[in-house]
Image (tube, rainbow, N blue to C red):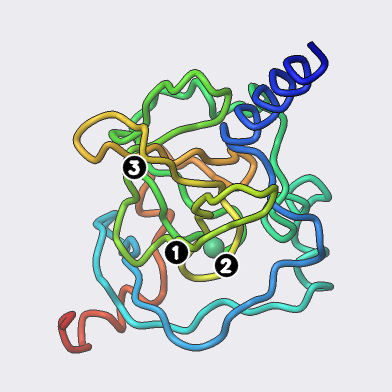
Amino acid sequence: MHWTMWATGGLGLAMALAACVRGSDGGATPQQTGKVRVSVYDEQGKLVGPIETDRVVKSDAEWRAQLTPEQYDVVRRAGTERPGTCALLHNKDKGVYSCLACGLPLFIADTKFESGTGWPSFFGPIAKGNVEEREDVSFGMSRTEVECGRCGAHLGHVFNDGPPPSGLRYCMNGVALNFTPTAKLATLADPIARTGATTQPAK
Ligand SMILES: [Zn+2]
């Protein structure tokens, strides 16, 4: 009986964690340096790329100054917002979700779906290089963490129980995202969109 109770409780905990929940709280997420290839919006509100650019690297003090404590906890310390708390959760407007920390476009509204988890969910990123995925073995589980491809902001996790066409569920923290409606995509214009016009096409 005791074992059954323990097992039931353990299963419940594991399921809750598997839904999206936070990674380890061992300190600020280490940042990588170097070049990345990402897609960005130009001044006409058109997605262009991939374009090679530098990773965004800032000191912990700079991130703390830029972000609110809640934002910092999620994007720099792999925290998780409480499910159901994000205003973007039920947003059905057409547009683009971008990285709160560096402005990189991450997901388009057409890929958003209602997962029932309490976190904004998408079946695929806007472009391949714009998110990075890596193994996360915290809590004794093997999950795939999703980060911003340019600044390393923790966004959430990806699971293979999503809808067609990808079968993937990108379970995101809404606090890590900014939303821009389609009519205002030009406001996401990134300076590297200009340099991209003169660089070599992607290999
Ligand atoms: Zn970013």
- Which of the two labelled residues, at mark 1 and mark 3, occupies the earlier sequence position? 3
Confirm if mark 2 falls within 8 A of ligand 1: yes
Say if residue 156 shows up in the picture.
yes
Which of 73/90 is in front? Answer: 73
Of tags 2 and 3, which is closer to the observer? Answer: 2
Amino acid type of the residue that numbered disc 2 sits on in the rendered structure: Gly
Image height check: is 21 above or below 72?
above
Q: Marks 2 and 3, Cα distance to the nearest angstrom?
A: 19 Å
Image height check: is 119 above or below 185?
above
Residue 92 appears left or right of 19: left
- Residue 132 is tagged as 1
Which of 203/160 is in front? Answer: 160
| Other residues around mark 3 within 10 Å, as few (<14) / some (14–19) / many (≥20) | many
- Which of the two labelled residues, at mark 2 and mark 3, occupies the earlier sequence position? 3
- Residue 38 is tagged as none
Q: How many marks?
A: 3
Q: Position of residue 83 (x, y in %)?
A: 66, 26
| Other residues around mark 2 within 10 Å, as few (<14) / some (14–19) / many (≥20) | many
Amino acid type of the residue that numbered disc 3 sits on in the rendered structure: Ile
Residue 113 appears left or right of 175: left
Residue 54 appears left or right of 38: right
SS under mark 3: strand
Confirm if mark 3 falls within 8 A of ligand 1: no
Q: Position of residue 35 (x, y in %)?
A: 43, 86
**What residue is at 77 percent from the left and 20 percent from the top?**
3
Res 28 quadrant in image: bottom right
Mark 1 and mark 2 residues within 8 Å of each other at the beta carbon: yes
Query: Label 2: which residue?
Result: 152
Amino acid type of the residue that numbered disc 1 sits on in the rendered structure: Glu
Q: Marks 1 and 2, Cα distance to the nearest angstrom?
A: 8 Å
Query: Label 3: which residue?
Result: 108
**What residue is at 70 percent from the left and 36 percent from the top?**
81
